[in-house]
Amino acid sequence: MVIERVEISVVPGRESEFELAMKRGCGLLARAENCSSVALSRGIENPSNYLLLLHWNSIDAHMAFTRTADFSSFRELAGPYFAQRPAMAHFEPIATE
């Protein structure tokens, strides 16, 4: 399993619009083949910052999704609200309880 962490900065004042768009956007992500979970969280100290966490079966599964129509639709939904390019990184779990 691979955990994808995406930090998203939203244009201040557009948070409500972004959250509304992400209701559909998270659905597009969740139905992706080999994606087992999607979670979006809002920053407490900085409410214009969001954390998107996805669990993929592999990096290859994530990369395959980026070539789909659903990924293009996701970018069209979320992209207008980005204050800057999202910061993304992948992690491999090593310890869980």
Image: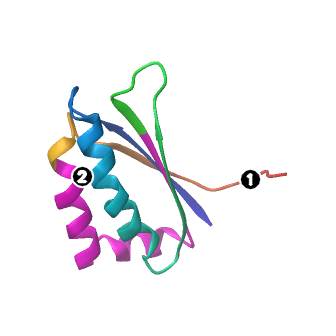
Circle 2 — which element?
helix
Query: N-terminal of the two: label 2 or label 1?
Result: 2
> In the figure, is residue 71 to the left or right of 55?
left
Instruction: Provide the residue span drawn in magenta.
Output: 51-79
Q: Position of residue 25 (x, y in %)?
A: 32, 61
Residue corresponding to mark 1 = 94
Magenta stretch: includes residue 62:
yes
Does residue 90 appear left or right of residue 66 in this picture? right
Amino acid carrying label 1: it is Ile
Badge 2 crowding class, 10 Å Cα cut-off, few under 14, some 14 to 19, many 20 or more, is: many
Can you give x and y, in whole percent of width and height, for residue 62 in the image? Answer: 42, 69
Q: Quadrant of the N terminus?
A: bottom right
12 versus 20 height, above or below: above
Q: Which residue occupies the extreme right position in the image? A: 97
Residue under label 2, please give it.
Answer: 78
Magenta stretch, main secondary structure class: helix
Q: Which of the pair 55/49 is nearer the observer?
A: 49
**Residues tagged 2 and 1 counted as in contact (Cβ below 8 A):** no
Marks 2 and 1, how far apart in space? Answer: 31 Å
Is residue 90 rendered magenta in the image?
no
Q: In the rendering, at what x and y percent does residue 19 appear?
A: 33, 45
Quadrant hosting residue 31: bottom left
Residue 66 is tagged as none
Horizontal side of residue 60 vs 87, given as left or right: right
**In the picture, residue 2 is in which quadrant?**
bottom right
For the question of whether residue 67 can be seen, the reply is no
Q: Residue at x 80, y 52 (%)?
A: 96
